[in-house]
């Protein structure tokens, strides 16, 4: 039971509000709370363990679902390993990424940047410009 609901019930028990008032307050609190389905997807605050990609699409009458969980420890290790890549190799990788249309400098990637990204991805939902398609990226 959440604290707000408990507070309403305490006020009712102490006679500070009537049953009708308590019912209205609890109804208002329930409207403000996320639905049960969405609350199961929100992770409790703490250090995220996974980066999750979920795609749900309906194309030509067929539903396709993709659900990928990437351990963030793998990403953290990858960022640390990237620091060990020789500068000549980093330059070649950056050149190839730029040719592929990905303007990214592998040499600039730092572990603290990854942590900042993880914190900002807490619950991000992307809407795709295609009917019947939802893409979600979030940490859990």
Image: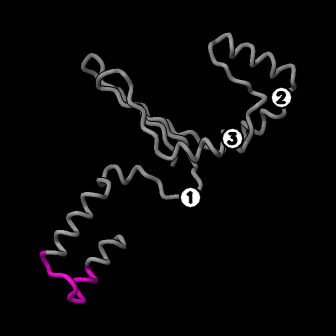
Q: Which of marks 2 and 3 is nearer the N terminus?
A: 2
User: Going by the image, does 55 lie left or right of 26?
Assistant: right
Label 2 Cα crowd, 10 Å radius (few <14 / some 14-19 / many 20+): few
Give the secondary structure at mark 3: helix
Per the image, the residue denoted by label 1 is: 46
User: Going by the image, does 113 lie left or right of 68?
Assistant: right
Residue 50 lies, in percent from the top left, at: 56, 45
Tag shown at residue 113 = 3
Label 3 Cα crowd, 10 Å radius (few <14 / some 14-19 / many 20+): few
Residue 42 lies, in percent from the top left, at: 43, 52
Image: 121 above or below 63: below
Name which quarter of the figure residue 5 lies in.
bottom left
Magenta highlight range:
9-20
Residue 122 lies, in percent from the top left, at: 51, 47
Can you name the residue that lies furthest to the front here? 16
Image: 102 above or below 136: above
Give the secondary structure at mark 1: loop
How far apart marks 1 and 3 lie (CA) works out to: 18 Å
Name which quarter of the figure residue 32 lies in.
bottom left
How far apart marks 2 and 3 lie (CA) works out to: 18 Å
- Judge by depth and name the residue closer to the eye, 120 or 90: 120
Per the image, the residue denoted by label 2 is: 85
Image: 11 above or below 54: below
How far apart marks 1 and 2 lie (CA) works out to: 31 Å
């Amino acid at each position: 039971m959440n604290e707000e609901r408990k507070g309403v019930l305490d006020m009712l028990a102490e006679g500070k509000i009537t049953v009708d008032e308590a019912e209205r307050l609890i109804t208002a609190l329930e409207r403000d709370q996320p639905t049960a389905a969405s609350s199961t997807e929100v992770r409790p605050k703490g250090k995220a363990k996974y980066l999750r990609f979920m795609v749900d699409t309906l194309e030509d009458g067929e539903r396709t679902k993709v659900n990928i969980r990437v351990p963030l420890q793998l990403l953290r290790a990858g960022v640390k390993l990237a620091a060990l890549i020789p500068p000549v190799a980093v330059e070649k990788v950056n050149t190839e990424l730029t040719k592929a249309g990905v303007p990214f400098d592998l040499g600039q990637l730092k572990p603290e940047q990854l942590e900042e990204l993880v914190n900002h991805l807490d619950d991000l939902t992307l809407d795709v410009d295609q009917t019947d398609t939802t893409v979600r990226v979030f940490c859990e």
